[in-house]
Each structure stands twice: as C-alpha cells, then as structure tokens.
Image: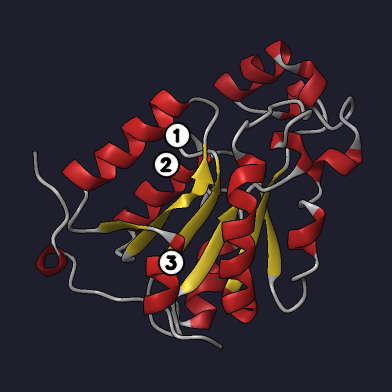
C-alpha cells in the first residue's frame, strides 16, 4: 500500500496558500438537522488554523434551496425526502457558522454554496484566482461528502491540497477513515494529509 513520502509531495504551504473551512454550521453540529458527531471535537484545531491565518481563511456555508422544487435533478428528489432541511422549514440560524468561527469574519470571508463541492455554484474559484492562491488547506465537514467533493475538484484544478486530518469530521468513523486512506493511497502526489501541529509548523503566519 503506497503511503505519502516527503519526496512524493514537493510542495509546502506558503503565505499565498488559502485555508478553506467547509460548512462548520449549526446545520451540521450536534443537535442540527444533519449532525456530525465529531464537529465539536475538531473545532479547537480549526480555531487554531483560522487564528494562524485569518486573512487567508475562507469559510463556506452549505445553503439548501428555499423549497425542494427549486432544486434540480436528483437534488429535487433529495429535498423531497429531506424537506425539513429546505430554507422554508429550517431555522435560519442553522445556516450560521459556529459562533467561535464567525468571530474571524472579517478579515476571513464567507462563501455560500448550494451543493457538496465548494467550487460549484459559488464564487470560490474566482476568489482564489483573485488572491493568487497557490494551494488549499482543507478543514471542516463532512470528510466523506463536501470535503471529498471539494478536494477532488481542487485536484482537478491543479491546486496542491493539504487535508488536516484532525480538523475534518464526518458522520461515521468508517467513512471518515476510508476517505483519509484514499488520499494517502491514491492521491498522495496531489493531496497531503497532515495534523494541525504539522500544518502550523509549515504554514507561514500572517
């Protein structure tokens, strides 16, 4: 089984590397409509990373449609099954970032997205180009859904990707571990997995 070696991943984060924190919202917090059990456990690590580079941090919010009929294709079917998560039914506060993270905005910014990948239906790609981003540090939720979709799109766009293993969380340990294994064994030349401490030792401070 192939594992990451330093020679296989020749990049390191720079001051132009952007921290992209996905969907750390009430919607996915314990007690939310789509609870992610480990969210509060990884929050302290995400806070450290955001504090290290607040001006280089972008938070995303997953924003469902107003009603299911506003969605397209299989998404319409999805929201027919989960009507309680449409904005018509959902408490608007559920879409807010967790309060400790919201305090970084500004200088951090928030970008809304309608689907799993942060690159689709959003201004993310344009924002990264405007900033001259040379890589992405990925944290947030969920490891096996929005994080995975965003990482694969970032890889296709050519960005070196740094997935912070103790700053991402999923709904199940099994799928969380499976996705991290996938990065290490199939994408190790384009995706580096590392801990918060290892990242902060590499990423230059503001």
Q: In what element is the residue under mark 2?
A: helix
Q: Is 92 above or below relative to 21? A: above
Check whether the beta carbons of the residues at disc 2 and disc 1 lie within 8 A of each other. yes
On the question of residue 73 being in view, the answer is no
Residue at the (77%, 51%) spot, across then down: 98
Residue at the (75%, 22%) spot, across then down: 68
Disc 2: which residue: 148
- Residues at marks 3 and 2, CA–CA distance in whole angstroms: 22 Å
Percent position (x, y) of residue 190?
A: 24, 58
Q: Is 40 above or below relative to 136? A: above
Residue at the (68%, 28%) spot, across then down: 35
Residue 103 relative to residue 112: left or right = right
Q: Nearer the viewer, residue 144 or 125?
A: 144
Q: Quadrant of the N terminus?
A: top left
- Residue 197, label in figure: 3
- Residue 144, label in figure: 1
Residue 49 relative to residue 104: left or right = left
- Residues at marks 2 and 1, CA–CA distance in whole angstroms: 5 Å
């Amino acid at each position: 089984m192939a594992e990451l070696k330093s020679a296989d991943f020749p990049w390191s984060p720079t001051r132009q590397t952007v921290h992209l924190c996905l969907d750390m919202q009430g919607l996915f917090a314990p007690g939310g409509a789509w609870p992610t059990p480990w969210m509060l456990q990884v929050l302290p690590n995400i806070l450290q990373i955001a504090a290290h580079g607040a001006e280089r941090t972008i938070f995303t919010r997953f924003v469902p449609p107003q009603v299911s009929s506003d969605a397209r294709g299989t998404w319409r079917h999805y929201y027919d099954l989960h009507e309680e998560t449409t904005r018509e039914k959902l408490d608007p506060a559920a879409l807010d970032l967790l309060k400790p993270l919201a305090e970084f905005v500004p200088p951090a910014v928030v970008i809304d997205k309608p689907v799993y990948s942060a690159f689709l239906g959003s201004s993310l790609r344009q924002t990264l180009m405007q900033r001259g981003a040379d890589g992405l540090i990925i944290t947030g939720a969920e490891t096996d859904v929005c994080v995975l979709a965003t990482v694969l799109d970032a890889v296709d766009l050519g960005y070196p990707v740094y997935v912070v293993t103790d700053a991402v969380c999923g709904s199940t340990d099994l799928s969380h571990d499976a996705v991290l294994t996938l990065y290490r064994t199939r994408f190790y030349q384009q995706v580096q997995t590392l801990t918060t401490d290892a990242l902060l030792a590499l990423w230059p401070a503001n």
